[in-house]
Amino acid sequence: MAQLCAEFQVHSTQLTEWKRLLVARAAVAFTGGAGADIEPALDVFPLHAKIGELTLENVF
């Protein structure tokens, strides 16, 4: 794990979380789109709106 953390510059807890998610959802990950009905963990629309807002602020 230490080698992966150093190579990809991520914290060990992040790798552990990714592994946990893979084990929990491996069947869905390799079914070729059968898991498309799973919602993302968070709504990205407000985040995209905020990015646009901050971009405009930076321009001015």
Image (tube, rainbow, N blue to C red):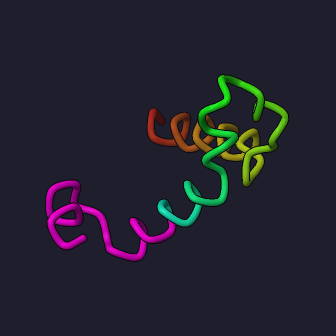
Main SS, magenta region, reads helix
The residue closer to the viewer here, 43 or 26, is 26
> Over which residues does the magenta segment extend?
1-17
**Image mark count:** 0
- Which quadrant of the rendered structure holds the N terminus? bottom left
Residue at 65% in and 23% down: 32
In the rendered image, the vertical position of residue 58 relative to residue 18, given as above or below: above
Question: From the viewer's perspective, is 21 left or right of 18?
Answer: right
Q: Position of residue 16 (x, y in %)?
A: 44, 71
Residue at 45% in and 33% down: 59
Q: Position of residue 14 (x, y in %)?
A: 42, 68
**Occupied quadrant, residue 11:** bottom left
**Occupied quadrant, residue 58:** top left
Residue at 49% in and 60% down: 18
In the rendered image, the vertical position of residue 5 relative to residue 56, given as above or below: below
Is 35 covered by the magenta stretch? no
Residue at 58% in and 41% down: 51
Question: From the viewer's perspective, is 58 left or right of 23?
Answer: left
The residue closer to the viewer here, 59 or 8, is 8
Q: Position of residue 50 (x, y in %)?
A: 65, 45
In the rendered image, the vertical position of residue 8 relative to residue 49, given as above or below: below
